[in-house]
Structures are given as C-alpha cells and as structure tokens.
Amino acid sequence: MNLKFNILIISLELIPIKKSCLTIIFASISFLTFLDTRAQQFNTDNYLTMPYGTATILLTTGGRNAGMAASFALAPKWEFFAQAFLFWENEKELAPQHFNVLGYAKYMFWVNKENNGGGGAFLGFGKSPGYWEQTEFLKSHQNIWTAVPITLPLFNNTISWDIMPGAIFDWSNSESGDPAWGFTYSTRVAVYKIIPKTAIVGEVYGTSGSAYSAPEYKIGLRWEPNNTIVPAITYGRALDGTSGPRLEIGVLIFSPQFLKKPLK
C-alpha cells in the first residue's frame, strides 16, 4: 500500500538477508499507532478502534492474493469487520485458486493517557468456502480465532511496537476432519520521522501447534498524506524461503462520520 519505491523491492530480492537478521530487525521495529494509522495489508493490528460512526475500506492486491476489507465502528470502542480474499493458483506449491472470508469484532479495552498506546481484543471466525480443483469441489478450512493487540510507544512516538498473541481453533484442518489448535504470534514495528508523512513498517507472524503455518515477514512503506486516503506498498516472504505474500500494494479509505454520537 505505499509509495513509488520499486527500488526498495528490487533491492530486497538482490541482497541476501539471513533469516536471523530478519527476525531481529522486524521484531524490533513495529508499527506507529497514531489515531490516523491502521493495519492495512499487514497481519498485525494495534489497540486502536476507529471513532464511533465511521467506516474504512481496504483494497489490496499482490503476488499471492487480492482482497477487500471493510470495518464499521457501530458502537464506542467497538469495530466490526468483514473481509474477503482471493488467492491465486500457485503451481509450484500445488495450491489451486481459492478464496477466504473473515468476520470479526474488535474491542478497545485500554488506552493510555497520551492516547498513543493501549490494548484491544479480537474475536472472529474464518472460512475458506472451498475451491475447484479441475472438476472437483473441495472443502477447505473453517475456524474461530482470538487475538490481543498491545501497543507500546517508544522514543517519543518515533517508534511504536505492536505485539499480538492469539489462538486459533480449526475444526476442518485436515482431510480426516480432525480439529487443530494453534498459537498465533505477530509483532510489528513502524518508524516515523525518517521519511516525511511516511512510516517504515516491518513485521513477523506465524502460527505454531497442530494448526501450523510457517513464519513470514513483511516490510513496507505507508504514505499518510491526509486522513482520508492512505496508500502503501509491502514485500514479504516466508522465513523458510518459500514464496510468501511477495509484492503487495493497496489503499485504505476512511469515511467521514455517518452516525451521530450516542447520547451520554
């Protein structure tokens, strides 16, 4: 979702980067959480919910998938989300084209005095309705999940660190239909005040347990010229060297307040 920095993406592919270095870098530079920042195509989120009566729309596309997400702040400190993603066919990894849908809610349970850090909680469900492989319709995953994003501002708001532990229960994880549990982990850092109106963002995320997913990283830029439209661009791969999300671009659109504030 960010800028015209194709040079950055090309250089990432040309320069060999050790996995241990990536982990250290992305675990130490998360994402700044001012009132006008959001998750966009990053996996990690922050404590913040949008002001009551507003909405956001995210459009993204990249090397692995394309999708859209919409959120609605229908109650104070609450936000409700709906997402849909289409994953492209990947012959190298034997993955046919398929799509996922997600629905979830977020509650902001704590905010610090400066309103630049705090805590939130997610509860949601996900479903891959299925996909066609040649002439056969195959069942895919269904799950419920939870996560708790905590935001820590650092160095006078130059850096903010998001930590988001969670859990997932997948009741159609395998061909046998046996349920699977997983511990989800995700951390994100953003650095401001280096490039004007732009955040340099990095994150690492994955799932351990029987509902395992390989750890991946993303690094990118978010351009924040105003409070209405925020474009960004990211690049990511799996730490084990497989393809991962690769190059992604997107835009986040913020609505004006469409609901009146509730009476106290």
Image: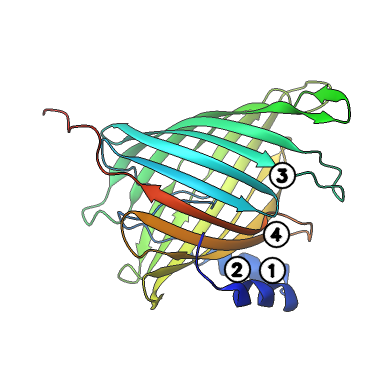
Instruction: State the CA–CA distance, disc 4 to disc 2.
Output: 16 Å
Q: Nearer the viewer, residue 89 or 217?
A: 89
Q: Verify CB contact (< 8 Å) between mark 3 and mark 2.
A: no
| Lower sequence index among marks 4 and 2 | 2
Between discs 1 and 4, the one toward the N terminus: 1
- Identify the residue position indicated by label 4 in the image: 237
The residue wearing badge 2 is 24
Whether tag 3 and tag 4 are in contact, CB under 8 A, the answer is no
Q: Nearer the viewer, mark 4 or mark 2?
A: 4
Relative to 211, say whether 178 is above or below: above
Q: Which residue is mark 1?
A: 20
Residue 3: x %, y % from top left = 50, 68
SS of the residue under disc 3: strand
Report how far apart the C-alphas of labels 3 and 4 lie in the structure.
13 Å
Q: Is residue 227 left or right of residue 148?
A: left
Give, as a three-letter code, the residue at label 3: Ser
Q: Which mark is residue 1?
A: none
Snapshot colouring: rainbow
Picture quarter containing residue 226?
bottom left
Position of residue 17 measured from the top left corner of the image (x, y, whole percent): 71, 74
* Position above or below: 80 against 18: above
Inter-mark Cα distance, 1 to 4: 14 Å
